[in-house]
Image (cartoon, rainbow, N blue to C red):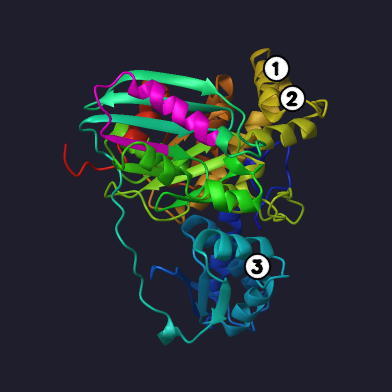
Amino acid sequence: MTSIPAVSIPPLEPSFIPAARWNRNYHHLVTQDKGARPLTIALLRPDGTVLRHETRVLSDSHPHALQTTQYAERLLKFLLWQQGGSRVLLAGADEVGRRLARLYRPRGKRAFDSTFMGRKVYGAAFAVDTVRMEDVPASHEAGFTLGRHLDGCRIGFDLGGSDRKVAALIDGKVVFSEETRWDPYFQNDPSYHLNGIQESLERAAAHLPRVDAIGGSSAGVYVNNEVRVASLFRGVSPARFERDVRHMFLVLRERWGGIPFEVANDGEVTALAGSMALNEGAVLGLSMGTSQAGGYVRGSGEITTWLNELAFAPINFAPDAPVDEWSGDIGCGVQYFSQQGVSRLAHLAGMAFPPEVALPERLVAVQDALERGDTRAVQIFTTIGRCFGHALAHYADHYEIRHVLVLGRVTSGTAGSIILDEARTVLRTEYGPLGDLLTISMPDEQTKRHGQAIAAASLPALSNL
C-alpha cells in the first residue's frame, strides 16, 4: 500500500489499514491482470431472497494471488453483516470458495458468523457452496415499505441500553414524550423488559384519545416482529429467550387489541428519521452509542430487508487490529464507533479507569476531559473521526449514499464536531469526489428529541380508522 497522508492517520492507531484503500489497491492489481476473473457471491435466505454481488479477482497464478482469499473473505464478511443470508454461493474462483467454506464451517475461524447468520437469524443451517456461474440465481428481494405513516393516534418507542423513550402523536404532532432510565442488559427475567415497555406505552396512551398504532425501534435483528437476536436481552438464558422473548412484541400487540404494531432495528429507524427530516433518500444512518448501529434508506425512500449491522463489518485490515471479544474477529466498526471504542482508545491514550467504572461513565469522563482541553481526549476523538472517514469510503463502496446522519452519545458536545470534521478531511484528502458527494451531518435538536420516536411511530400502516 502507498503511504497514508499524515492528516489521515489515526494518531492512536498509526498501523490502521483502511479497508477502502486496501480494496482500491487490490482492484488496481486486477485491472492490470490479463487473466483476471469474474467472481459472483450470492447470499440466499429461506424466504427466497437472493442478493448478488459481482466483482473481479486476480488469476490464480498471479504473484499476489494469495491476496484474493483475503479480499473475498473480508468482502463476504461485510456482505453478510450488511445484507444477511444463511446460504452463500460463490462462482468464478473455485479455490477461493473452498477456502471460505472451511473458514465458515462449525469449527472454522468464522464459526461465530455462520452460527449467527444460520440458526439464530434465519433458522437454517449455514452453508458456503462453490457452484458454476450459470447456477447462481438472479437477484430477488421483496419490497419493504414500512414507515412514513403519520395519520391517526400513534405511539412510538425506542429501546436503548441505558434508557427507553416513548412519544405519543396525533396526526404526526408530538403531544407527549418521555425518557426513562433502565438497565436491560443483564436482567435475567424477561418480565423486566416486558413490564418496562408496557409501562411506557401506558404513560403515552394516557395522552391520546385512542391508540391506533404502535411502532418501535430497538437494537437487534427483528423478523416479522419476532426478536431473533438483541443485545437488550443478553442476560436472558437461551431457554427463556425462546419462551418469553422471541414473541414479546407479538404479546404486546395482543395486549393492545391487535392494532397495527411494528418493530424495526434502531439503525433502520434512525435512517428513516433522517430521511423524513431531510425529505431525501439514499441516507445512511449511523449511531455511535452502546454499540454501532446502522440503517439505510434507499434512494427511493424505502428501508431495506438488510441487516445493516455495521458494528461487525470490518473496516481495518491491519493484522494487529483490535479483536472483538464477541465475534472473535478483528478490525470491526464496534471497536471504534461506540462507547466500547472510546474506552479502548482511552486506554491507548493513557487514561485509566477502575474496572468498576461502566462504559457510559467512561465516555462521560473522556468527553468532560475534552471540554477541559485534555490533549489525550483530543487524540481519542481525532482517531475516531479519521477512522470514520475511511469507514465511510468503505461503506460508500457498498451503498448508494448521498447523506450520512450521525448520532449517538459518543457524538455529544465537542466530540461530535471533531469526529465529523476529521472524517470530512479524510474523505477530501484520500477519496477525492466522495468528499463533495457525501453530506455528513448530525440531527438538529428537534430530530434528536423526537425524530426517532416519530419515525418509529410511523412504521405501521393503518388498515382503517
| 246 versus 373 height, above or below | below
Question: Which is nearer the N-term, disc 1 or disc 2?
Answer: 1
Q: Quadrant of the N terminus?
A: bottom right
Question: In percent of the image, x 40 and y 28: which residue is there?
Answer: 201
Q: Nearer the N terminus, badge 3 or badge 2? A: 3
* Secondary structure type for disc 1: helix
x%, y% of residue 359? 69, 30
Q: Are marks 1 and 3 in contact (CB under 8 Å)?
A: no
Which secondary structure lies at badge 2?
A: helix
Look at mark 3 in the image and give the residue it sits on. Answer: 70
Identify the residue at image location x=69%, y=48%. Answer: 16
Q: Is residue 33 above or below residue 193?
A: below
Residue name at image x 70 percent, y 20 percent = 365
Task: Using residue 334 as the reference point, say whether residue 14 is left or right of it.
Answer: right
CB under 8 Å between callouts 3 and 2?
A: no
Side of 238 relative to 148 (left or right): right
What residue span does the magenta drawing correspond to?
Answer: 193-216
Q: Which residue is mark 2?
A: 376
Tell me, yes or no, whether the two marked residues, 1 and 2, touch with CB atoms within 8 Å: yes
Q: Disc 3 to disc 2, how far (Cα)?
A: 34 Å
The disc labelled 2 sits on which kind of residue? Arg
Residue behind mark 1? 369
Q: At label 1, which amino acid type do we have? A: Ala
